[in-house]
Amino acid sequence: MNKESEERKRGLAPYWPMVAAGLVVRLAVIPFVYRDWLDPFIVEHWAFGRVARSLVTGHGFGNVFADTGPTAVLSPVYAYLLAGIFRLLGPNTAASVVTALAINSLFSALTCIPVFLLARRCFGDRVAKWAGWLWAFSPYGIYYGASWAWSTCLLTLLLCALFLIALELENSGRLLHWIGFGLLCGVAALTEPVALSVLPPLSAWTCYQRYRHGCSWLGPGITAILAVFVVLSPWIVRNYQTFHQFIPVRSGLGLELYIGNNGYSARWVNSALHPNHSDAELAEYERVGEVAYMDHKRQQAVDYIQTHPGWFARMTLRRVLYIWTGYWSLSRAYLADEPLDPPNIFVATTLSVLAFLGLRRAFRLNRAIAVRFAIVFACFPLVYYLSHPETYYFRPVDPLIVVLIAVAVAGSPRPSQPSSPPTPVGATSQT
């Protein structure tokens, strides 16, 4: 009898108290922070809020910066979720904002489940308990769950769950399992397309592990890819019909590249060049349309990078440092705008150091599993190194960081037994 069956027989699974504690602490924070999302300036520039409001008022998926019509700047999943809340409780009301933050808090708290199961699957019960409770009281998990009305917490839950599922698929050749994985990958991509930076290499590693053990991999892999396209295709078709151009998920990469690569280095991004903060940029966006505007921003960024390669190299290194440590500058002018950076630098740097110590130990315990963590750490932030980071961009990786911190703190120094190899083709599988 496996552990899951034993837990069902006993009743309460060990991760439910973690979920409950994590949810309680996140909900307790909401009353202190929700009013920020009612500020008129925030309401006017809250991209997901603008699109959700456009949906419930009958103007379709659009009006992301101003009343300019259809858009593909944002991906659809969270926008439609928020629109559902707005339809029930009214756009930008206190009730709708509190509900949105409560749902995000629930997503964040539920992440305790894949965190616990992943840690137990890879490193045993002791590490699982540490990891689950660490996530329940993670400072970033609490903060972004309770105070950030964005898609971050949903993506965090989906990525952690998909990381676990990709690992479990090493032992399953059932096409139904691979179809479910592909469908959920499609949902994650439509939540935030950055998910596609890690899900293909994680899936490829799963297929490679099955190939090494003489198990079927090509058919299951193709099946999962087709399932992804089943989920993505309606949105791709909508974008093509609307903009007459192939846009897989989002159209805004050109703008993101431009506001991070234009010669400005006092902060990691020049917000003054964003249509939310620049009348000239908004006027150009309205005049030429979304697709032409994004193409122009991309070309401006590429031109600057090509003519200033040294600047781009230095900025890229600074962005790498910022993502992993939270450090950008300690100048007085900078800290006047970012007064919480010093404590955040301490927290971010400590978590990163412990995570890399845990990764080193994970390689000693089980190289095949450790490679999965390394894939995410290497691939997920790549687009942010090249464009620009924000403090919340890297948060979907935090559950994996927490698991590795638990390995560093509580992991056994002795090599663990390798996971059971997949059942070879032709053999009877009980998976």
Image: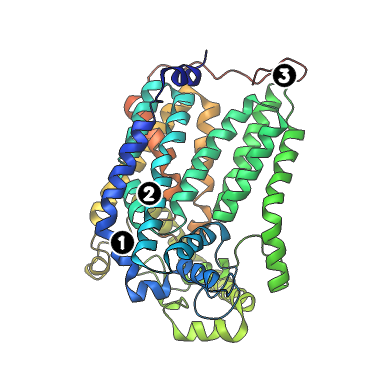
Residue 241 locus on image (x, y percent): 73, 70
| Residue 196 visible (yes or no) | no
Q: Are marks 2 and 1 in contact (CB under 8 Å)?
A: no
Q: Is residue 415 left or right of residue 348?
A: right
Q: Secondary structure at mark 1?
A: helix
Residue 224 coordinates in the image, percent (x, y): 70, 40
- Tell me the CA gap for discs 2 and 1: 12 Å
Who is closer to the viewer here, 69 or 208?
A: 69
Mark in front: 3 vs 2: 2
Left or right of residue 81: residue 104: left
Q: Say what amino acid the circle numbered 3 marks.
A: Pro
Name the outermost residue toward the top. Answer: 1
Instruction: Report the residue marked by disc 1.
Output: 34
**Vertical relation: 237 (above or below) 221:** below
Describe the element under mark 2 as helix, strand or loop: helix
Q: Residue at the spot x=47%, y=27% of the render?
A: 363
Estimate the spatial distance between the alpha carbons at disc 1 and disc 3, rounded to whole Å. Answer: 53 Å
Residue sitting nearer the eye, 287 or 389: 287
Quarter containing the C terminus: top right
Give me the residue at 42% from left, 30% from top. Answer: 116
Which residue in the structure is indicated by mark 3? 424
Q: Check residue 388 in the rendering and tell me which mark sits there, or answer none.
A: none
Decide which of tag 1 and tag 3 comes sooner along the chain. 1
* Residue at the disc numbered 2: 105
Which of the 4 image quarters holds residue 92? bottom left
Q: Amino acid at mark 1?
A: Tyr
